[in-house]
Amino acid sequence: MMSVTNQGDLFDFARGRGGPTGRAAEALETGRSRLLVTGLVVTMAFAALGWRVVDLTLFTDRAELHLSRNVNPQVPVQERADIVDRNGIVVATSLPAVSLYADPKHVLDVQETADKLIRALPDLDREKLEKRLASRGRFVYLKRNLTPEQHYEVHRLGLPGIQFERGERRVYPQGRLLAHALGVTDIDGRGTAGIERHFDSRLTGGAAPLRLSIDLRIQAVVHEVLSDAVKEFSALGGTAVVMDANTSELVAMVSLPDFDPNRPVELLGEAGFNRATKGVYEMGSTFKLLTAAMALDSGVVPISGGYDASKPLRIARFTITDYHAKNRWLSVPEILIHSSNIGAAKMALDVGTKAQQTYLGRLGLLRPSPVELPEVGHPLVPAPWREINTVTISYGHGLSVTPVQLANAIATTVNGGIFRPATLLTQEAPQGIPGSRVFSSDTSAKMRGLMRLVVSRGTGRNAEKEADGYLIGGKTGTAEKVKAGGYSDKASIASFVGAFPIHAPRYVVCVVVDEPKGTKASFGYATGGWVAAPAVGRIVQRTAGIMGIAPEYGMPRLAAAKDLPSEAEEIEAALKPAALRELEDISRQPEQVRAAQ
């Protein structure tokens, strides 16, 4: 009966008289249930996926997004501008770099990961490395600025939780050549010294290259010549600057000892000290040039005048003497030729303390130089400023300034009397930045003649020998170093500052050597005339051609009289060998006889 009933049901169903019954209906219902469950599962999966997208978009911690940007394999846009010399040669730039970091959450085995990393990077410290790998943070640096080889070795390990960050590394193609001018950046690319620090905000952001006034060709010569001088005289160090006499642009600036900015650790200690702009020194007899310029400019003594230097000068409890005393009346030119302290002191007393302070202030010697560096020294100025200070400052003692400041003052003295502050940036205008008058053009012309006389007939003759046909004018300086309770008679600062070509100065060169020691070749002398003057002559001889300045063989003395004012007859005469003897003969006569004549 059961089979009959089932057959009937099937026939009825086939004829459309009803729905499925029995097992068929049960099977159909099961299929519907399964289809419904599957749909629900798929719907829930899509819903979960959608929620994750929303979560990642709106609610994920920003630190994770920053992390994803850090591991972007694309090379980033350069963020720090290049620095170039005045001719456009790159002296500082940024290159793509890779740093190694870890996400400790994804490090599976700290010890195994540390073992493999140390095999690839042996300089890593295991204790510090394991501590970082086991930390609770999501981002920790393991090593900055990997080399390409190191990057490859770590990458091939495929360690979970170990990733790379793209960035930049500051490099200095010229090495230590411009160390103190450029300075350095820290590991995060922020300037910490030199130009890099002073112009940090300007360089950040990928702006146009920063163009310096430094000429890399001149810088290389100055670095080599100064290095040789420091080595030859076994000195503690030294500095040399070349300054454009008309714009006050620093064309070269070297300080020794120096460092390689590609290895910032070398910056520590003495090597990081910039003697050119940070070191302040008593410059000795080079200051006599400024004293003579003040006296001539203020009218207290004419170029044909002079002073009695036949005996020491007593000021309060101090006695002023000459190193190589002539023990007679000296003309103004002779005071510089023979570097007379007595003559300079008497000129300063005639100028007066107030006027001396005014001139020195206008020359920028009583305040820090505005040169674009953070490493700038403050002049050591006497307080109170007594008469004895006026006297000692006249010959370069009692006031300490930087070599850049001295070069700046001498540039003012020879360029027509206009002071323009020292700068490390190229100047677009032909005459650089606006300046202020300190000396008259007449005084400046007379000083050029006097400076030439010192080199051709005075203590600067060794500069002339080395210059080989180029006309230099300048002054030597030798100052005992200050020590506790006074001055050291065994340690000195030897210097020479000069301008060339002296009849129409274009550049000022200043060399300062710290604690030189005499040699057999210098007959045991370690003075400015034996140490610094020859170095200046070599710098001029090797760089003048680069600067487009031709030598003047055959007429070194007559050429030096160009552009001198007609009233400066004594200087013109002194520039001629025959007349020089006549001038010396006349100057040996007592002052009253000369006055009567």
Image (cartoon, rainbow, N blue to C red):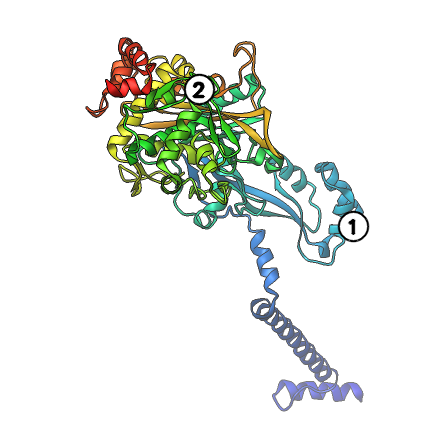
Horizontal and vertical percent position of residue 330 = 36, 20
Horizontal and vertical percent position of residue 322 = 47, 21
Q: Which residue is mark 2?
A: 533
Q: Nearer the viewer, residue 112 or 84?
A: 84
Mark 1 belongs to which amino acid?
Asp
Q: Nearer the viewer, residue 277 or 387?
A: 387
Looking at the rendered image, the disc whose residue lies closer to the viewer, 1 or 2, is 2
Residue at x 40% of width, y 23% of height:
475
Residue 589 visible somewhere in the drawing: yes
Q: Which residue is mark 1?
A: 109
Residue at x 52% of width, y 48% of height:
74
Dot 1: element: loop
Horizontal and vertical percent position of residue 99 = 61, 45
Residue at x 42% of width, y 33% of height:
406
Residue 472 visible somewhere in the drawing: no
**Horizontal side, residue 196 vs residue 301: left or right:** right
Within 10 Å of the Cα at label 2, are there few (<14), some (14-19), or many (20+) other Cα atoms? many
